[in-house]
Image (cartoon, rainbow, N blue to C red):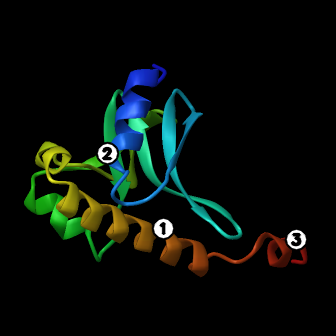
Amino acid sequence: MAVSADYKAFIEELFHPFGPVKVRNMFGGAGVFAPLGDGDIMFGLIASQTLYLKGDETNRPDFEEEGMGPFVYGGKGKEMAMSYYEVPERLYDDPEEFTTWARKALDVALRAKSSKPSRKSKRRV
């Protein structure tokens, strides 16, 4: 199900204290991207009108302490969990803490990007 224009506008407003984000449709949901000098980086995901932020071992405990799980989708006959975790609803009313969580998610995405080999080096193999 596509993400509604109203929900996209709500998400962009929610991220306003964090900084500008771009919400782009993808695969029936949407990605939340932060603009960088060398391109945008995805650090959030929207599915079924629900916001998820990128997680790893550094911030996953924050989500788990709130009882929030990962985004799960059905793929190839089984469920697959992604490294994006549902944002606790209480953060929608706390711009300062939401911004802290968003910055942590962006840091996770940046670390993940820097640990991947560049496309040019993949082609040479």
Q: Nearer the viewer, residue 61 or 87?
A: 87
Residue on which the image places disc 2: 14
Badge 1 element: helix
| Vertical position of residue 70 compared to residue 36: above or below | above
Instruction: From the top left corner, tell me how far across and down residue 50 is, in percent.
Output: 31, 35
How dense is the environment of label 1, judged by Cα within 10 Å: few (below 14), some, or many (20 and up)?
many
Bin the neighbour count of mark 2 within 10 Å (Cα to Cα): few under 14, some 14-19, many 20 and up: some
Image coordinates of residue 79 in percent, x first then y, are 38, 39
Q: Which residue is drawn at the image coordinates 18% and 69% (left, top)?
A: 61
**Distance from label 2 to label 1 (Cα)?**
19 Å
Q: Position of residue 25 (x, y in %)?
A: 57, 33
Q: Amino acid at mark 1?
A: Ala
Asked which quadrant contains residue 71, the reply is top left
Kindly identify which residue carries mark 1: 109
The amino acid pointed to by label 3 is: Arg
Give the SS element for disc 2.
helix
Q: Nearer the viewer, mark 3 or mark 1?
A: 1
Foreground mark, 2 or 3? 2
* Residue carrying label 3: 123
* Mark toward the start of the polypeptide (3 vs 1): 1
Q: Residue at x 37, y 28 (%)?
A: 7
The N terminus, quarter of image: top left
Image disc number at residue 17: none
Q: Is residue 69 left or right of residue 31?
A: left
